[in-house]
Amino acid sequence: MAVCAWATAAAAVRLPGPVTLLAAAAGGALLLLLLVVSPWKRQSRYGRSLAAALAPLAVLALVASSAGSAVVSRHSGPAGAAVTSSASITGELVARSDARPAAADRFSGKPRYLLEAELNSFTWAGERSPANLPVLVIGGEAYAGIHLGDRFSTAGTLSASAPGDRSAAVLRVSRPPAVQSAGGLLALATDLRTGFASRAEAIGNRDAAGLLPGMVLGDRSAAPEDLTKAMQDTGLTHLTAVSGANCSYLLAFVFLVARLFRAPRSAAAVVAVVVLAGFVLVVRPDASVLRAAVMGSIGTAAVLTGRGKVPAALLCLCAVILLVADPWLSGSYAFILSVSATAGLIFLGPRLTAGLGRFLPQPLAVLTAVPLAAQVACSPVLILLQPNLPAYSLPANIAAAPAVPFVTIAGMAAAVLGQVAPALALPLMLSAGVGAGWVAGVARFFADAPGALLPWLPGPAGAAAMAAAAALLTLGVMRLGRVKGSGGATAAARGQGHHRQIRSPRTHPGARRSGRVRGSRTVVRLGAVLAGAALAAVLAAAAFRLVPQDAAGRAWIAAGCDVGQGDALAVRTGPESAVVIDAGPDPPALDACLDRLRIRTIDLLVITHAHADHYAGAAAAGDGRMVESLAFSSAEPGLPAEISELARGLGVQPQRLAKGGHGQHGGVRWDVLWPPAKASPGATGNGPPAGLTENDASAVLLVRTEGINLLFTGDLEEDAARQMLRSSPELRSETVHVLKVAHHGARNSGGVLPAELRPPLALISVGKENTYGHPAPETLKNLEQAGSRIARTDQLGSFVLHLKDGSLLVSGLDAGF
C-alpha cells in the first residue's frame, strides 16, 4: 500500500489536475465494482486476487483525489491567472515555516532568505482577490526574522514553480515586509527556539554552540559551514534533524519521570504525549517531524507496554496517511530518508543484530546494527543527493550514538528552564554542550581521515549500484553470522564425537557422514559470503571507475559545447551543476551536451546578447533540469521579447547584466566587465548607454574557478573591446588563462584582446564548414602571435578543460576526459 501511495502521489503532483481527478474517479469506480463482485467470488482463486487489490485501489483513489483537487485549486481563479501571467502583486501572507538563509544574491552579493508561506489575498491590476496559494518567498535580510505563523504583507512578482514543487509559485519580493507576529502557543514555541539558540552561544565552544540547537531542535542555522560539511562527509547529518529516536527518548523520559512521582500509567502517558506535542511545535511540524513523532510514539508505547517492536504495517499506514494529506511529500528527500531509515530499523535491524551477535558481544552488536541498518536503507537515496560514499559513516555513528540521548534530554530541559529559570538551565546547557562537542569532534576526526569521502556513480545508475552493494553487504553479515554459528555447532559435535570415540574404538559411519555434511555446508556458506563480498567490491570498483577520479569529484572545470554556428559554454559549480554562458541556436544540440556533462542544475544561465545563435537553443536548458536564474544583456532599452519568452518558459525572473555586477556559486565567482551601466540607472528593463550595437552590448564576464581565470566575451567587436580594456584595470593585474574568442573568431573580433591579454588558451565556438568564413585567418594569426593555443568546436566537437598535475588540458568530451 505504501508503495502504491508513493507512486500515485509522485505522478499525481506532476500531472494536470483534471487528469488526476479522472484517474481517481476511475479507481473509485473500479473499487466499488470489486466490492460488489468480491463477496460472490470470495471462495475462488480469482476472488482472493480481487480482494487483495481492494486496498491498493482505495489508496490510489484517495491519494489521486487529494492531489488532483489541490492541483486544480492551485491553477484556478484569479491566483492561477496571476501566476500564469507572472504578475506583479501586493499580497497578504501567513508564514508556514521560519525564514532560512539561502545563497547570496548573484548580482548584488547581498544575503537572501527563503520562506514558505500561504498567500491569503492579493491585489493585481487594481483588483483585490482572495487566495489560498502556497508560495515560496525569496527576499532579503528584512525577511530573516519571520517565523512560523507570522502574518505579513509585501509586494513582488509571481512566477510559476516547476511541476511537482510543493509551492505553487515563487514570489520574488521587491520591498520589505510589514510583519504582524504570531501570538499564543506559536509565539511561545518561537521564543523557546530562538532563546535556546542564543543561550547556546554561552557554551564558548564554537562547534558545540553551533551544533547543539540542531541536535535538540533541528535548528541548523548557527552551525559553522565547515562543521556542516564534516557532518555530511561522515554520515552524521541526521543527528541535526529530529528523528523518531529523539521523540522516543523524550517520551520515555517524561513517562518514567511521571511514574516516579506516582502518576497513574494513563496520566503519565497523557503528560508524555502533551510534552511531545509541544516539542513538535517548537521544532516545527513539518512532515518528517510528524512522521518521527508518530513512529516514535508507537515504538515507545510498544516498549513500555511490553508488546514488542513496531510492526511494519504501522509504518506503511503512517506513510499512506501523510501522503494522502500532503501528496507533495513524495518528492521530499527529508521524508523519503526518514521513512527509509525507519524501514531499515524495522526490517533489517533485528536481522543484522542477530547476524552480528554471533561474533560480537550483544551490546556492541546492537550498537553496530542500528546505524548500519539505517545507513543501508538510506544509502541509495543519499547517492541521488550526493554521489559520494562516506567511508567512515558506520564507526562515526557508533562513536556519536552514546551522546545523542543525553544531548536530547538535557537540551530539551535547558530549553524549557531557560524561559522560566535561566540559572538552573545553565548547567544543563553546558552538559548538553559537552555531548554536542563530542559529536562535532567525531565528525571532524573522521572527515579528516584519509579517504573519508569516496566518489560513486551518480544518478539512478549509482543508486541502483548502491542498492545492490547494500543488499550484498546485508546478506553477507547475516550469512557470516550463520556460518559462525554453524562452525560452533560443528566443533561441539566433533568434541562430543571425540569423547564417544575415547569410550568406543568404533565410530558410527552416519556420524562421520553428518560431520562431513556440516563441514561442507560451512565451506559453501563461507564461499557464498566471500563471493558476495567480491561482487560488492566489483560493483564498487565499477562505480568508482565510472565517475571522475579526483577526490573532490571535479573532473572538468569548463566546457565548450558543439552547437553548430553559435556559442554555448559551461563552468562547473558542483557535481551536477554549472553556470551556462549562451545556448547556441539548436536546442537538441545544447540538451545533448548538457546531458553528457551530467548537468542537472543550472545555477545561472547567461545570454550575452539577443542574437539567435546565442539564445535560440536556451529552451533546452530547462529540459529535465532546474534553471535557478537567468541574466542577459542587450542593446534594446527594455526587456527583449525573446528573453521575456525564455524567462517565462523557464519560470525565472530575468536580470540585466551591467558592469559592476558579480556573483558566486560554489567555488565559481564571476564579475561583469561590460557593458557599462546607464549614468542614471532605472528599472531592471533599462539598457546600456545608447549607441551600442547588439554585438557591442554583449556581456563580458571574468570567471574565476580552481585558480583559473576565464574571460567570456560574447560577440564583442574591436572598438568596444578597447573601451572595455580601458575600464577594466583588473585585466592588467590578473592573468587571463582562457579567452573565449569573440564572435566565433570573426575578423571584427580584432586582435586587441589577444595582444593585451596573451592568454595561454583561446576557445573558439564555431560551426563546422560554416558559410561565414569563421574563424578568420587574421584572428588565428593574432592568437598565434600572442602565444595562445586554440581549441575549436569545429575541430574537436564538444570539449572540456581540466587540470592534471597543475597543467590545464583540453580533451574532447567523447574521449571520456
Image: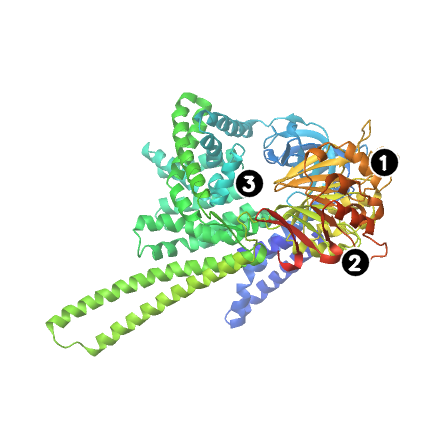
- Name the residue located 64 percent from the left edge and 34 percent from the top edge: 104
Disc on the earlier residue, 3 or 2: 3
Task: Determine crowd level at label 1: few under 14, some 14-19, many 20+ residues with C-alpha closer than 10 A.
Answer: few
Q: Amino acid at mark 1?
A: Pro
- Name the residue located 32 percent from the left edge and 70 percent from the top edge: 521
Element under label 2? loop
- Tell me the quarter of the picture where residue 545 sits: bottom right
Give the residue number, with chain letter if any, for mark 3.
286
Comparing 36 with 193, the one in front is 193
Comparing 333 with 588, the one in front is 588
- Residue 125 visible within the image: yes
Front: mark 3 or 1: 1
Q: Which mark is residue 637?
A: 1
Q: Which mark is residue 768?
A: 2
Q: Amino acid at mark 2?
A: Lys
Residue furthest front as drawn: 785
